[in-house]
Image (cartoon, helix red, strand yellow):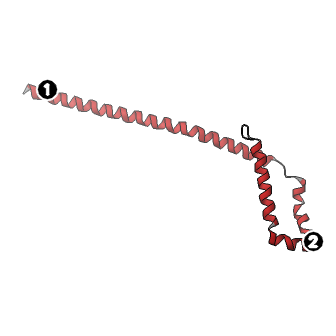
Amino acid sequence: MDGCRCVDNVGRSVGLECRRVDKLIEFLQRILEWFIEVMLWVPRKLYELVTDGLASFVEGIPVPDFMTNLASWVGSLDPSIAFFTAPLNIGTGLGIVIAALTIRFLIRRIPLIG
């Protein structure tokens, strides 16, 4: 009888130790998940700060004076010129050319690329 009681006590203590080890492993997993979350948060936050700074820089650039009078210049075009600009899609073409030149200008400002 004493042998059975001893085995029961050993079985209980082993089960108790297994539960403690499981809780320790679970705790360490939660710490590791938190650490990974923080390590992923830092680059996201840096990216957000850089893009916000870039956006505020671009917004701070004043509009050129000739752009404020552009609507009146276009409105003062002769109707015969406007007749030929519509089928040729001059407005779309100019928009594409200006966008391409702007992108080219910005790419040339990037170190090691431009």
Can you tell which mark lies on residue 78?
2
Furthest residue in direction left, as rendered: 1
Can you tell which mark lies on residue 106?
none
Say which quarter of the image contains residue 79.
bottom right
Q: How far apart are the two marked residues, 1 and 2, measured between alpha carbons?
A: 108 Å
Residue at 79%, 57% in the rendered image? 97
Q: Position of residue 68 (x, y in %)?
A: 88, 58
Amino acid identity at mark 1: Cys
Quadrant for the N terminus in the image: top left
Of the pair 68 and 94, the residue shown nearer to us: 94
Q: Secondary structure at mark 2?
A: loop
Residue at 69%, 45% in the rendered image? 52
Amino acid identity at mark 2: Asp
Say which quarter of the image contains residue 96.
bottom right
Residue at 10%, 29% in the rendered image? 4
60 w.r.t. 24: above or below: below
Q: Which residue is mark 1?
A: 6
Sort mark 1 into few (<14), some (14-19) or many (20+) by Cα contacts within 10 Å.
few
Residue at 78%, 51% in the rendered image? 102
Q: Position of residue 66 (x, y in %)?
A: 90, 56
Relative to 73, 101 lies left or right:
left
Q: Position of residue 16 (x, y in %)?
A: 26, 31
